[in-house]
Image (spheres, rainbow, N blue to C red):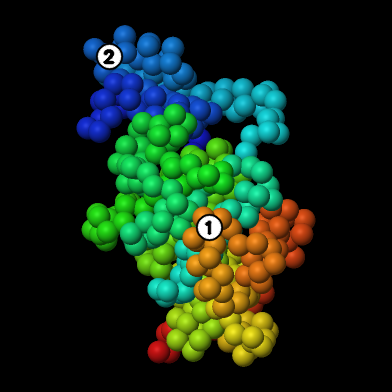
Amino acid sequence: GDIDLVLLDVSLPDSHGLDGLNAIRIHAPDLPVVLLTGWNNESLALRAVQSGAQDYLVKGTLEGPALARTLQRTIVRQQTHAAALPVDPGKESARVVGLLGAKGGVGTTTIACHLARELKRQSGGRILLMDLDSADNVISFLMNAEGSHTILDATDDVLRLDRDFWAKLVTPCADGVDIIRSAGAACREEQRPKAERVRFIIRFVRSLYRFIVIDMGRLSPFSAKIAEGAERLLLVSTCDVLGLHEAKGAVQVLHQAGFNPGQLALVLNQASHPPAFTDRELENLLGAHVEITLPEARKDLVHSLLDEKRLGESRAFQQQVTQFAARIADPAQDTQKPKVRFPFLRGVLRSAATTN
């Protein structure tokens, strides 16, 4: 995003010849590319123009004014060409929903699986369920979908990433949801895929899906970076004292990091009946909007896991997930449009952090 032009050297340590151009053409076909080449590579540069490069420059003849004119002409030419193209209303750009656990054991993965299934049922579009938790592929277990590839296979080979390559990496489920698996225990912190590469992959696959649901695991520098690209970030917690304490701390960290409060909402799981707190009391306590409150449903969830399907809508847990998925699938129903519900919070939290 926000890139006008790429000036690409044909001789780079990690991208030689036309490799870099081909990768750009796959991932950003509308981005103009000007090649920078030496005298002995002019034939390669001509082939590059035939492959989609806008122009090429020979290093030995570079001068400032001529370089500026070439780049300006290339940008204007590309903008004129793009303006003349018809708009494709059928091109998808997935909405990204991220789920982040305030602590372990709050049901983040279970909720992600049910939300993805429900979005598939309601929208009929393609759904991607992305597992970025470092746990041992719990999503694959819950969705009964075993595959041989993980997110590391994608981040380690981004130059090959196109529709065909991606189709080989994902694991299709029986209910129509695609899964990209976590690397699990093999993905220790020092081996974890770089967040920028994961965000690059998310941007690429947005054109392939209607919705992308991401299980980000617990709050960490890695998950916080991924969360920046989500339209919706759901912080999952339980309603017990420890869960609420962890949730409040996570909300403060996200606010202090500059995260947009209007994109953040709480999912409170395993709630008692009747509830110990009202939504307004919880919002005042935690500093974020309460999106849904899910009841205790361990027994129902075990049965659904054994049956390898989503809960029936007669169950209170599934009713809440169904209603939330409907608000995501149809933005017109979404009364929780990104709003700054607590505009004073960021300054208050930062002052508190400074004081502490």
> Label 1 belongs to which residue?
307
Image-quadrant location for residue 316: bottom right
Count up the numbered dots: 2
Ranked by sequence position, the earlier of labels 2 and 1 is 2
Left or right, 193 with respect to 304, comes to left
Residue under the image location 31 percent in, 56 percent down: 184
> Residue 262: x, y in percent?
62, 67
Task: For mark 2, give the secondary structure.
Answer: helix
Query: Could you say which disc has been placed on residue 3 in the image?
Result: none
Residue found 58% across the figure and 53% down from its top: 117
Q: Nearer the viewer, mark 2 or mark 1?
A: 1
**Residue 16 visible in this rendered orientation of the protein:** yes
Image quadrant in which you'd find residue 353: bottom left
Residue at x 44%, y 12% (from the top left corner): 50
Q: Amino acid at mark 2?
A: Asn
Q: Secondary structure at mark 1?
A: helix
Kindly identify the residue that appears in the image at 41 percent across and 56 percent down: 141
Residue assigned mark 2: 41
Look at the picture and state if 254 lies above or below 216.
Answer: below
Residue 107 versus residue 130 in the image, above or below: below
Q: Is residue 112 visible?
A: no
Q: Position of residue 187 (x, y in %)?
A: 27, 55
Q: Is residue 32 left or right of residue 345?
A: left
Q: Quadrant of the C terminus?
A: bottom left
Amino acid type at image mark 1: Asp
> Real-space Cα distance between discs 2 and 1?
62 Å
